[in-house]
Image (cartoon, rainbow, N blue to C red):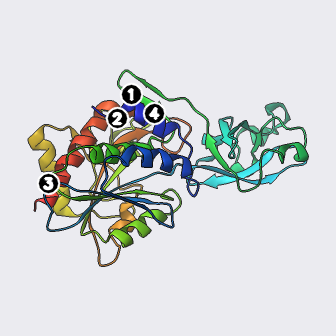
Amino acid sequence: MLDYELLQKLCTSCGISGDEGEVRELILNEIKPFADEITVDASGNIIAFKKGRRTPAKKLLISAHMDEVGFIVTYITSDGCLKFDCVGGVNDSAAFSKNVKVGPKKLHGVVCAKPVHLLTADEKKKSPKIKDLLIDIGAESREEAEKYVSPGDSIVFDSLYENRYGRVISKAIDDRFGCLVLIELIRSELEYDTWFSFVVQEEIGLRGAKCAAFSVAPDNAIVIEATTAADVPYSENEDRVCLVGGGAVVTFMDRATIYDKEFYRIAKECAEQEGIKFQTKTKIAGGNDAGAIHSSRGGVRTLAISVPCRYLHASGSLASTDDMEAVFRLARSAAARIQGM
């Protein structure tokens, strides 16, 4: 069984794109006793090597990203509130009225907008835009706020972690779950030598993965991710994309990558032979670090295995522990099969 206490630590750590230091230190402390080599590159990626019982003919990289979506302080108003902008793809409505933590002091704040009794009739019909929102930290003036906060400070959602009824509810399951899978693999005995990368800045353009893939120069790669499950009452049929409880998601194509067809077939065969529940996405949507990895150097044969997750890029997302276990089992099996080719 996966270490869900560690998943809680990972998900509740702060680490928006470009400010992943806290979660990076947590990961380093977890893998140092088990990895044979560890480096942190100039981008902040962790690149680790774990020796297995055998050396494969081709080099495999297994990758997940450390960063989460969030916000950044852009301006402090005269009355001590904070203007901000998005870091990563956060919907305007996902930000309004949410609790947040601001800056290195993790100051508590709330995202606010014009009070409802001051809205015009037209404004009441529209969701507030990020540009119209503020963060209230309780300061009475710019001078007071500046004692604790500066432009450029990171802002993360402040939300609880719960694991009940086989469901995890938390911020940052995307992609701290993937980080957990990599840590568990590094902790385990591996059949083949394997490279791992915990990368930065996925949410703002797959930037860390581009650097890590260039440095490692793998022949093959597996990306472990969280992907959109839209199995909610507002959607039906193919619009549901994938289902929480439906098993590991093996993707054949998204907006950034057409995945290696043989690896896609191998993953499905592994799942069928080992009784691992799996599914595919019913829409060509989204993307992940595979978009940067598969086109690195002369090209990298790439597979993505994801956990279906509702409400990505919000203050709270939801995923199934059964699906998480399925992703871990399938990642381990598919990696060994690919390395043994």
Q: Nearer the viewer, mark 3 or mark 1?
A: 3
Q: In terms of depth relative to the viewer, which is nearer, 292 or 33?
A: 33
Q: Is residue 309 visible?
A: yes
- Secondary element at image label 1: strand
Q: Earlier in the sequence, mark 3 or mark 1?
A: 3
Q: Nearer the viewer, mark 2 or mark 4?
A: 4
* Distance CA(mark 3)–CA(mark 1): 35 Å
Q: Earlier in the sequence, mark 3 or mark 2?
A: 3
Say what amino acid the circle numbered 1 marks.
Arg
* Distance CA(mark 2)–CA(mark 1): 9 Å
Q: Are marks 1 and 4 in contact (CB under 8 Å)?
A: no
- The residue at which mark 2 appears reads as 244
In the rendered image, residue 193, in percent from the top left (x then y), is placed at: 21, 58
Say what amino acid the circle numbered 4 marks.
Gln
Q: Are marks 2 and 4 in contact (CB under 8 Å)?
A: no
Asked if residue 110 lies left or right of residue 214, the reply is right
- The residue at which mark 1 appears reads as 167
* Distance CA(mark 1)–CA(mark 4): 13 Å
- The residue at which mark 4 appears reads as 8
